Amino acid sequence: MWKRATAEGAVAVGAAPADAGWQAPSEVERRLYEAKSRHDWAAYMDVLAGECLFRLASRTWLDANPGRIPARYHPVWRPEVNDWCAAVYTQGMLPAPVEDPVFIWEDLGSYASGWSAEDPPWLAVNPGSPCEAYFPAEPGYRALWQQHADRVEVVNSPGTLRTLWVGGPRSGEVARGLACGALMCVKNGVYWNALGHGYGYEHERRLLDRWWGVTTRQKWLCYQEELLTNEMSSPVWEFALGVRHSLAQDFGGHVEPGHWRQAAERVLRSRVPTARVELTPDGVTRTEGPSAEEMEAQVEGVKRLIGRITRYEARFRADGLLPEGRFVRSVAAWDYGRGSNMARFGLASRFCTLEEAEEAVLRAGRVSAVAYRSWEDFSAGYALGRCLHFDDEEFGPWYEETLSAHRILTTDPESPWLTIPFRPEDEG
Protein backbone atom coordinates (compact mmCIF):
# COMPACT_ATOMS: atom_id res chain seq x y z
CA MET A 1 0.00 0.00 0.00
CA TRP A 2 1.14 3.53 -0.63
CA LYS A 3 -0.17 6.99 0.07
CA ARG A 4 0.80 10.12 -1.74
CA ALA A 5 -0.37 13.72 -1.35
CA THR A 6 -0.33 15.94 -4.43
CA ALA A 7 -0.65 19.57 -5.40
CA GLU A 8 -4.22 18.81 -6.42
CA GLY A 9 -4.92 17.70 -2.88
CA ALA A 10 -5.36 14.00 -3.60
CA VAL A 11 -4.20 10.97 -1.69
CA ALA A 12 -4.09 7.91 -3.92
CA VAL A 13 -4.10 4.48 -2.32
CA GLY A 14 -3.38 1.04 -3.69
CA ALA A 15 -0.69 -0.84 -5.59
CA ALA A 16 -1.19 -0.59 -9.33
CA PRO A 17 0.16 -4.09 -10.23
CA ALA A 18 -2.47 -5.76 -8.02
CA ASP A 19 -5.18 -3.89 -9.92
CA ALA A 20 -3.84 -4.67 -13.39
CA GLY A 21 -6.66 -7.10 -14.20
CA TRP A 22 -9.46 -4.90 -12.92
CA GLN A 23 -12.42 -4.37 -15.25
CA ALA A 24 -13.78 -0.85 -14.89
CA PRO A 25 -17.58 -0.68 -14.81
CA SER A 26 -17.65 1.94 -17.55
CA GLU A 27 -15.58 4.38 -19.56
CA VAL A 28 -15.74 6.91 -16.70
CA GLU A 29 -14.10 4.65 -14.14
CA ARG A 30 -11.53 3.53 -16.71
CA ARG A 31 -10.50 7.14 -17.26
CA LEU A 32 -10.26 7.73 -13.51
CA TYR A 33 -8.11 4.64 -13.08
CA GLU A 34 -5.78 5.61 -15.90
CA ALA A 35 -5.39 9.17 -14.58
CA LYS A 36 -4.67 7.79 -11.10
CA SER A 37 -2.12 5.33 -12.51
CA ARG A 38 -0.30 8.27 -14.15
CA HIS A 39 -0.62 10.36 -10.95
CA ASP A 40 -2.32 12.91 -13.19
CA TRP A 41 -4.66 14.37 -10.60
CA ALA A 42 -5.60 17.35 -12.74
CA ALA A 43 -7.00 14.91 -15.33
CA TYR A 44 -8.67 12.90 -12.57
CA MET A 45 -10.41 16.02 -11.28
CA ASP A 46 -11.47 16.98 -14.80
CA VAL A 47 -13.20 13.60 -15.16
CA LEU A 48 -14.98 14.15 -11.84
CA ALA A 49 -16.01 17.66 -12.86
CA GLY A 50 -17.79 16.30 -15.92
CA GLU A 51 -19.76 13.63 -14.08
CA CYS A 52 -22.63 13.33 -11.62
CA LEU A 53 -21.25 12.40 -8.20
CA PHE A 54 -23.64 10.38 -6.06
CA ARG A 55 -23.88 10.25 -2.27
CA LEU A 56 -26.05 8.41 0.21
CA ALA A 57 -29.17 10.07 1.58
CA SER A 58 -32.01 9.02 3.82
CA ARG A 59 -35.12 8.24 1.80
CA THR A 60 -37.21 8.92 4.90
CA TRP A 61 -35.70 12.41 5.18
CA LEU A 62 -36.16 13.15 1.46
CA ASP A 63 -39.80 12.03 1.54
CA ALA A 64 -40.43 14.26 4.56
CA ASN A 65 -38.67 17.22 2.92
CA PRO A 66 -39.76 17.24 -0.75
CA GLY A 67 -37.73 19.51 -2.98
CA ARG A 68 -34.86 19.78 -0.51
CA ILE A 69 -31.40 18.21 -0.48
CA PRO A 70 -29.76 17.23 2.83
CA ALA A 71 -26.89 19.58 3.55
CA ARG A 72 -24.82 17.17 5.64
CA TYR A 73 -22.77 14.38 4.12
CA HIS A 74 -22.93 10.85 5.48
CA PRO A 75 -19.51 10.27 7.12
CA VAL A 76 -17.56 7.04 6.62
CA TRP A 77 -14.28 6.09 8.26
CA ARG A 78 -11.55 5.20 5.79
CA PRO A 79 -8.30 3.63 6.99
CA GLU A 80 -6.50 4.89 3.88
CA VAL A 81 -6.48 8.40 5.36
CA ASN A 82 -7.21 7.35 8.96
CA ASP A 83 -10.05 9.85 9.12
CA TRP A 84 -13.72 10.50 8.39
CA CYS A 85 -14.69 11.06 4.75
CA ALA A 86 -17.73 12.09 2.73
CA ALA A 87 -18.02 9.31 0.17
CA VAL A 88 -19.14 10.00 -3.40
CA TYR A 89 -19.48 7.57 -6.29
CA THR A 90 -19.56 7.74 -10.04
CA GLN A 91 -22.63 6.11 -11.55
CA GLY A 92 -20.90 2.89 -12.54
CA MET A 93 -19.81 2.28 -8.96
CA LEU A 94 -23.26 2.44 -7.36
CA PRO A 95 -24.46 -0.71 -5.55
CA ALA A 96 -27.76 -2.48 -6.13
CA PRO A 97 -30.70 -0.36 -4.96
CA VAL A 98 -32.32 -0.92 -1.56
CA GLU A 99 -35.41 0.64 -0.02
CA ASP A 100 -33.48 3.04 2.23
CA PRO A 101 -31.01 4.71 2.02
CA VAL A 102 -31.00 5.99 -1.55
CA PHE A 103 -28.56 7.99 -3.66
CA ILE A 104 -28.73 11.58 -4.83
CA TRP A 105 -26.26 13.44 -7.02
CA GLU A 106 -24.52 16.78 -7.15
CA ASP A 107 -21.72 18.09 -9.33
CA LEU A 108 -18.19 18.81 -8.16
CA GLY A 109 -18.87 22.54 -7.94
CA SER A 110 -21.76 21.90 -5.53
CA TYR A 111 -19.49 19.88 -3.28
CA ALA A 112 -16.88 22.63 -3.42
CA SER A 113 -19.32 25.38 -2.45
CA GLY A 114 -21.58 23.43 -0.11
CA TRP A 115 -19.02 22.07 2.35
CA SER A 116 -19.23 23.30 5.93
CA ALA A 117 -17.04 23.10 9.00
CA GLU A 118 -19.27 20.31 10.38
CA ASP A 119 -18.67 18.08 7.37
CA PRO A 120 -15.93 15.41 7.21
CA PRO A 121 -12.41 16.65 6.45
CA TRP A 122 -12.02 14.44 3.36
CA LEU A 123 -13.82 13.72 0.10
CA ALA A 124 -13.56 10.03 -0.82
CA VAL A 125 -14.18 9.17 -4.48
CA ASN A 126 -15.24 5.58 -5.18
CA PRO A 127 -13.68 4.36 -1.91
CA GLY A 128 -12.56 0.76 -1.83
CA SER A 129 -12.11 0.48 -5.60
CA PRO A 130 -8.96 0.58 -7.77
CA CYS A 131 -10.00 4.01 -9.07
CA GLU A 132 -10.46 5.50 -5.59
CA ALA A 133 -8.90 8.78 -4.50
CA TYR A 134 -9.11 10.98 -1.41
CA PHE A 135 -9.11 14.78 -1.41
CA PRO A 136 -8.69 17.05 1.62
CA ALA A 137 -11.72 19.30 2.00
CA GLU A 138 -9.94 22.33 3.39
CA PRO A 139 -10.96 25.68 1.80
CA GLY A 140 -7.82 25.96 -0.31
CA TYR A 141 -8.26 22.53 -1.80
CA ARG A 142 -11.96 23.11 -2.42
CA ALA A 143 -10.96 26.18 -4.42
CA LEU A 144 -9.07 23.77 -6.71
CA TRP A 145 -12.21 21.65 -7.07
CA GLN A 146 -14.11 24.76 -8.05
CA GLN A 147 -11.54 25.65 -10.70
CA HIS A 148 -12.06 22.26 -12.35
CA ALA A 149 -15.82 22.59 -12.03
CA ASP A 150 -15.71 26.02 -13.68
CA ARG A 151 -13.62 24.67 -16.53
CA VAL A 152 -15.48 21.44 -17.24
CA GLU A 153 -19.23 21.36 -17.81
CA VAL A 154 -21.23 18.49 -16.33
CA VAL A 155 -22.46 16.66 -19.39
CA ASN A 156 -25.02 13.86 -19.35
CA SER A 157 -23.65 12.92 -22.79
CA PRO A 158 -26.91 13.33 -24.73
CA GLY A 159 -26.77 11.51 -28.04
CA THR A 160 -24.17 9.02 -26.77
CA LEU A 161 -24.26 5.25 -26.41
CA ARG A 162 -23.17 4.45 -22.86
CA THR A 163 -22.68 0.90 -21.65
CA LEU A 164 -22.02 -0.59 -18.23
CA TRP A 165 -19.28 -3.13 -18.79
CA VAL A 166 -19.77 -4.46 -15.25
CA GLY A 167 -22.98 -4.27 -13.21
CA GLY A 168 -25.44 -4.29 -16.11
CA PRO A 169 -26.58 -7.20 -18.31
CA ARG A 170 -25.12 -7.25 -21.82
CA SER A 171 -26.75 -10.47 -23.02
CA GLY A 172 -29.83 -12.49 -22.22
CA GLU A 173 -33.50 -11.72 -21.85
CA VAL A 174 -33.19 -8.79 -19.43
CA ALA A 175 -30.60 -7.15 -21.66
CA ARG A 176 -32.92 -7.62 -24.67
CA GLY A 177 -35.75 -5.90 -22.79
CA LEU A 178 -33.47 -3.06 -21.73
CA ALA A 179 -32.30 -2.65 -25.33
CA CYS A 180 -35.93 -1.96 -26.29
CA GLY A 181 -35.50 1.30 -24.36
CA ALA A 182 -32.12 2.12 -25.88
CA LEU A 183 -33.39 4.86 -28.21
CA MET A 184 -34.40 6.95 -25.21
CA CYS A 185 -31.20 6.03 -23.35
CA VAL A 186 -28.98 7.18 -26.21
CA LYS A 187 -31.03 10.34 -26.63
CA ASN A 188 -30.59 11.13 -22.91
CA GLY A 189 -27.00 9.88 -22.70
CA VAL A 190 -27.68 7.31 -19.97
CA TYR A 191 -26.44 3.73 -19.66
CA TRP A 192 -28.67 1.56 -21.81
CA ASN A 193 -28.21 -1.52 -19.59
CA ALA A 194 -28.47 0.13 -16.17
CA LEU A 195 -31.34 -0.94 -13.94
CA GLY A 196 -30.85 0.78 -10.62
CA HIS A 197 -30.55 4.37 -9.48
CA GLY A 198 -30.88 6.41 -12.67
CA TYR A 199 -29.86 9.95 -11.79
CA GLY A 200 -30.76 9.53 -8.17
CA TYR A 201 -33.92 9.18 -6.13
CA GLU A 202 -34.90 12.83 -5.83
CA HIS A 203 -34.07 13.66 -9.46
CA GLU A 204 -35.92 10.65 -10.89
CA ARG A 205 -39.00 11.39 -8.81
CA ARG A 206 -39.08 14.98 -10.06
CA LEU A 207 -38.77 13.84 -13.67
CA LEU A 208 -41.53 11.26 -13.31
CA ASP A 209 -43.80 13.93 -11.86
CA ARG A 210 -42.91 16.53 -14.51
CA TRP A 211 -43.15 14.32 -17.60
CA TRP A 212 -45.71 11.75 -16.52
CA GLY A 213 -47.54 13.09 -13.49
CA VAL A 214 -46.53 9.93 -11.61
CA THR A 215 -46.24 10.53 -7.86
CA THR A 216 -47.47 7.22 -6.44
CA ARG A 217 -46.81 3.52 -6.88
CA GLN A 218 -50.41 3.02 -8.01
CA LYS A 219 -50.02 5.54 -10.84
CA TRP A 220 -46.72 3.96 -11.84
CA LEU A 221 -48.31 0.50 -11.93
CA CYS A 222 -51.16 1.83 -14.07
CA TYR A 223 -48.89 3.53 -16.60
CA GLN A 224 -46.46 0.61 -16.70
CA GLU A 225 -49.31 -1.74 -17.61
CA GLU A 226 -50.76 0.63 -20.21
CA LEU A 227 -47.39 0.96 -21.91
CA LEU A 228 -46.70 -2.78 -22.03
CA THR A 229 -50.17 -3.46 -23.45
CA ASN A 230 -49.93 -0.66 -26.02
CA GLU A 231 -52.83 1.26 -24.50
CA MET A 232 -51.04 4.55 -23.86
CA SER A 233 -50.78 5.80 -27.44
CA SER A 234 -53.70 6.82 -29.63
CA PRO A 235 -55.67 3.78 -30.89
CA VAL A 236 -56.39 5.77 -34.06
CA TRP A 237 -52.74 5.43 -35.08
CA GLU A 238 -52.91 1.65 -34.81
CA PHE A 239 -56.26 1.59 -36.59
CA ALA A 240 -54.92 3.47 -39.60
CA LEU A 241 -51.74 1.38 -39.82
CA GLY A 242 -53.76 -1.81 -39.37
CA VAL A 243 -55.98 -0.95 -42.33
CA ARG A 244 -52.96 -0.52 -44.58
CA HIS A 245 -51.35 -3.72 -43.31
CA SER A 246 -54.51 -5.65 -44.14
CA LEU A 247 -54.60 -4.16 -47.63
CA ALA A 248 -50.96 -5.06 -48.19
CA GLN A 249 -51.62 -8.64 -47.16
CA ASP A 250 -54.74 -8.90 -49.31
CA PHE A 251 -53.30 -7.34 -52.46
CA GLY A 252 -49.58 -7.89 -51.96
CA GLY A 253 -47.08 -5.06 -52.05
CA HIS A 254 -47.41 -1.29 -52.09
CA VAL A 255 -50.64 0.41 -51.01
CA GLU A 256 -51.39 3.77 -52.60
CA PRO A 257 -52.39 6.51 -50.09
CA GLY A 258 -55.66 7.13 -51.97
CA HIS A 259 -56.63 3.46 -51.73
CA TRP A 260 -55.64 3.49 -48.06
CA ARG A 261 -57.83 6.51 -47.29
CA GLN A 262 -60.83 4.99 -49.05
CA ALA A 263 -60.46 1.70 -47.23
CA ALA A 264 -60.08 3.44 -43.85
CA GLU A 265 -63.24 5.43 -44.51
CA ARG A 266 -65.21 2.31 -45.44
CA VAL A 267 -64.09 0.52 -42.30
CA LEU A 268 -64.92 3.50 -40.11
CA ARG A 269 -68.39 3.90 -41.51
CA SER A 270 -69.15 0.19 -41.30
CA ARG A 271 -67.88 -0.20 -37.76
CA VAL A 272 -69.89 2.58 -36.15
CA PRO A 273 -73.67 2.05 -36.16
CA THR A 274 -76.03 4.84 -35.31
CA ALA A 275 -76.85 3.16 -32.00
CA ARG A 276 -76.14 -0.09 -30.19
CA VAL A 277 -77.43 -1.92 -27.14
CA GLU A 278 -74.92 -3.13 -24.55
CA LEU A 279 -75.40 -5.48 -21.62
CA THR A 280 -73.49 -4.09 -18.64
CA PRO A 281 -73.34 -5.09 -14.95
CA ASP A 282 -75.84 -2.29 -14.32
CA GLY A 283 -78.32 -3.56 -16.89
CA VAL A 284 -79.10 -2.88 -20.53
CA THR A 285 -77.66 0.35 -21.88
CA ARG A 286 -78.43 1.99 -25.21
CA THR A 287 -75.41 3.79 -26.62
CA GLU A 288 -75.91 6.34 -29.35
CA GLY A 289 -73.40 6.43 -32.15
CA PRO A 290 -71.74 9.58 -33.40
CA SER A 291 -73.77 12.23 -35.15
CA ALA A 292 -73.30 12.83 -38.87
CA GLU A 293 -71.02 15.76 -38.10
CA GLU A 294 -68.95 13.68 -35.66
CA MET A 295 -68.63 10.87 -38.18
CA GLU A 296 -67.39 13.25 -40.89
CA ALA A 297 -64.88 14.70 -38.43
CA GLN A 298 -63.58 11.22 -37.60
CA VAL A 299 -63.23 10.30 -41.25
CA GLU A 300 -61.42 13.52 -42.11
CA GLY A 301 -59.17 13.12 -39.08
CA VAL A 302 -58.08 9.65 -40.15
CA LYS A 303 -57.47 10.86 -43.70
CA ARG A 304 -55.23 13.64 -42.40
CA LEU A 305 -53.42 11.14 -40.20
CA ILE A 306 -52.75 8.93 -43.22
CA GLY A 307 -51.22 11.92 -44.96
CA ARG A 308 -48.98 12.62 -41.98
CA ILE A 309 -47.85 8.99 -41.79
CA THR A 310 -47.11 8.92 -45.52
CA ARG A 311 -44.97 12.06 -45.30
CA TYR A 312 -43.09 10.82 -42.23
CA GLU A 313 -42.34 7.50 -43.90
CA ALA A 314 -41.02 9.27 -47.00
CA ARG A 315 -38.63 11.24 -44.77
CA PHE A 316 -37.68 8.05 -42.89
CA ARG A 317 -36.72 6.39 -46.17
CA ALA A 318 -34.73 9.41 -47.31
CA ASP A 319 -32.79 9.39 -44.03
CA GLY A 320 -32.21 5.65 -43.94
CA LEU A 321 -34.48 5.00 -40.99
CA LEU A 322 -36.83 2.93 -43.14
CA PRO A 323 -35.73 0.79 -46.10
CA GLU A 324 -37.08 1.54 -49.55
CA GLY A 325 -40.41 -0.11 -50.23
CA ARG A 326 -41.08 -0.75 -46.53
CA PHE A 327 -43.65 0.84 -44.28
CA VAL A 328 -44.37 0.99 -40.55
CA ARG A 329 -46.78 -1.73 -39.48
CA SER A 330 -47.34 -0.57 -35.90
CA VAL A 331 -46.34 2.20 -33.51
CA ALA A 332 -46.55 -0.14 -30.51
CA ALA A 333 -42.75 0.25 -30.17
CA TRP A 334 -43.35 3.79 -28.94
CA ASP A 335 -45.18 2.33 -25.93
CA TYR A 336 -42.97 -0.72 -25.50
CA GLY A 337 -39.75 1.31 -25.59
CA ARG A 338 -41.14 3.74 -23.04
CA GLY A 339 -42.37 0.78 -21.01
CA SER A 340 -38.81 -0.53 -20.77
CA ASN A 341 -37.69 2.85 -19.48
CA MET A 342 -40.68 3.23 -17.17
CA ALA A 343 -39.42 0.13 -15.35
CA ARG A 344 -36.08 1.91 -14.77
CA PHE A 345 -37.83 5.07 -13.62
CA GLY A 346 -40.02 3.12 -11.23
CA LEU A 347 -37.07 1.36 -9.63
CA ALA A 348 -34.96 4.51 -9.33
CA SER A 349 -37.96 6.26 -7.73
CA ARG A 350 -38.66 3.24 -5.49
CA PHE A 351 -42.17 2.79 -6.84
CA CYS A 352 -41.28 -0.85 -7.51
CA THR A 353 -38.79 -3.51 -6.49
CA LEU A 354 -35.87 -4.77 -8.55
CA GLU A 355 -37.80 -7.97 -9.26
CA GLU A 356 -40.82 -6.02 -10.51
CA ALA A 357 -38.63 -3.82 -12.71
CA GLU A 358 -36.90 -6.85 -14.22
CA GLU A 359 -40.24 -8.52 -14.96
CA ALA A 360 -41.49 -5.36 -16.70
CA VAL A 361 -38.32 -5.20 -18.78
CA LEU A 362 -38.69 -8.87 -19.71
CA ARG A 363 -42.28 -8.20 -20.82
CA ALA A 364 -41.09 -5.28 -22.96
CA GLY A 365 -38.72 -7.60 -24.78
CA ARG A 366 -41.35 -10.30 -25.26
CA VAL A 367 -44.14 -8.07 -26.60
CA SER A 368 -41.71 -6.27 -28.90
CA ALA A 369 -40.55 -9.58 -30.39
CA VAL A 370 -44.18 -10.48 -31.14
CA ALA A 371 -44.98 -7.15 -32.83
CA TYR A 372 -41.78 -6.63 -34.86
CA ARG A 373 -39.23 -8.56 -36.90
CA SER A 374 -35.99 -6.71 -36.19
CA TRP A 375 -34.41 -3.84 -34.27
CA GLU A 376 -34.71 -1.67 -37.40
CA ASP A 377 -38.40 -2.52 -37.72
CA PHE A 378 -38.91 -1.72 -34.04
CA SER A 379 -36.98 1.56 -34.39
CA ALA A 380 -39.15 2.80 -37.27
CA GLY A 381 -42.30 2.11 -35.26
CA TYR A 382 -40.88 3.92 -32.24
CA ALA A 383 -39.81 6.89 -34.35
CA LEU A 384 -43.21 7.24 -35.98
CA GLY A 385 -44.99 7.09 -32.64
CA ARG A 386 -42.71 9.71 -31.13
CA CYS A 387 -43.12 12.00 -34.13
CA LEU A 388 -46.90 11.66 -34.22
CA HIS A 389 -47.01 12.47 -30.51
CA PHE A 390 -44.56 15.38 -30.42
CA ASP A 391 -43.20 16.57 -33.74
CA ASP A 392 -46.24 17.89 -35.66
CA GLU A 393 -44.37 17.50 -38.99
CA GLU A 394 -41.71 20.01 -38.06
CA PHE A 395 -38.94 17.40 -38.39
CA GLY A 396 -37.29 19.23 -35.52
CA PRO A 397 -35.52 17.96 -32.37
CA TRP A 398 -38.11 15.28 -31.62
CA TYR A 399 -37.32 13.68 -34.97
CA GLU A 400 -33.62 14.51 -35.22
CA GLU A 401 -32.86 13.08 -31.76
CA THR A 402 -34.53 9.80 -32.65
CA LEU A 403 -32.82 9.61 -36.03
CA SER A 404 -29.42 10.23 -34.43
CA ALA A 405 -30.05 7.55 -31.78
CA HIS A 406 -31.19 5.12 -34.50
CA ARG A 407 -27.99 5.66 -36.47
CA ILE A 408 -25.82 5.14 -33.40
CA LEU A 409 -27.62 1.97 -32.37
CA THR A 410 -27.44 0.48 -35.86
CA THR A 411 -23.74 1.24 -36.43
CA ASP A 412 -21.82 1.39 -33.13
CA PRO A 413 -20.00 -1.94 -32.55
CA GLU A 414 -20.95 -1.83 -28.85
CA SER A 415 -24.63 -1.31 -29.60
CA PRO A 416 -26.95 -3.93 -28.10
CA TRP A 417 -28.81 -3.90 -31.39
CA LEU A 418 -25.70 -5.38 -33.00
CA THR A 419 -24.77 -7.74 -30.16
CA ILE A 420 -28.19 -9.01 -29.00
CA PRO A 421 -30.57 -10.75 -31.46
CA PHE A 422 -33.98 -9.07 -31.57
CA ARG A 423 -35.80 -12.32 -31.03
CA PRO A 424 -34.70 -15.12 -28.66
CA GLU A 425 -35.07 -17.73 -31.40
CA ASP A 426 -32.49 -15.87 -33.50
CA GLU A 427 -29.70 -16.49 -31.00
CA GLY A 428 -27.05 -18.88 -32.19
Image (cartoon, rainbow, N blue to C red):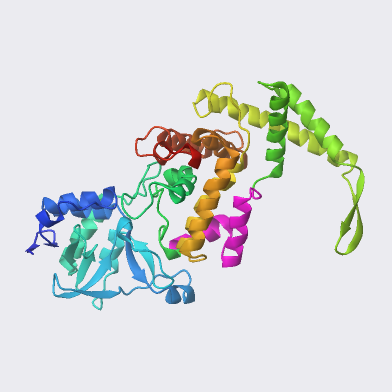
Kindly indicate the quadrant of the structure image that contains residue 333: top right
Percent of width and height locating residue 338: 54, 49
Residue stretch rendered in magenta on the structure: 203-232
Give the residue at the far bottom of this rendering. 118
Kindly indicate the quadrant of the structure image that contains residue 115: bottom left
- Left or right, residue 63 beside residue 333: left
The residue at 48%/77% (across/down) is 64
The residue at 63%/37% (across/down) is 330
- Left or right, residue 273 beside residue 37: right
Kindly indicate the quadrant of the structure image that contains residue 262: top right
Q: Nearer the viewer, residue 167 or 309?
A: 167
Q: Is residue 260 visible?
A: yes
| Residue 211 on the magenta segment | yes
- Left or right, residue 147 beside residue 178: left
- Left or right, residue 254 beside residue 268: left
Q: Main secondary structure of the magenta part?
A: helix
Q: Is residue 342 visible?
A: no
Q: Nearer the viewer, residue 419 or 203?
A: 419
Percent of width and height locating residue 176: 46, 46
The residue at 55%/55% (across/down) is 211
| Residue 66 on the magenta segment | no
Q: How many numbered marks, from 0 up? A: 0
Percent of width and height locating residue 425: 50, 39
Percent of width and height locating residue 69: 40, 70
Q: Nearer the viewer, residue 88 or 362?
A: 362
Q: Is residue 296 above or below residue 134?
A: above
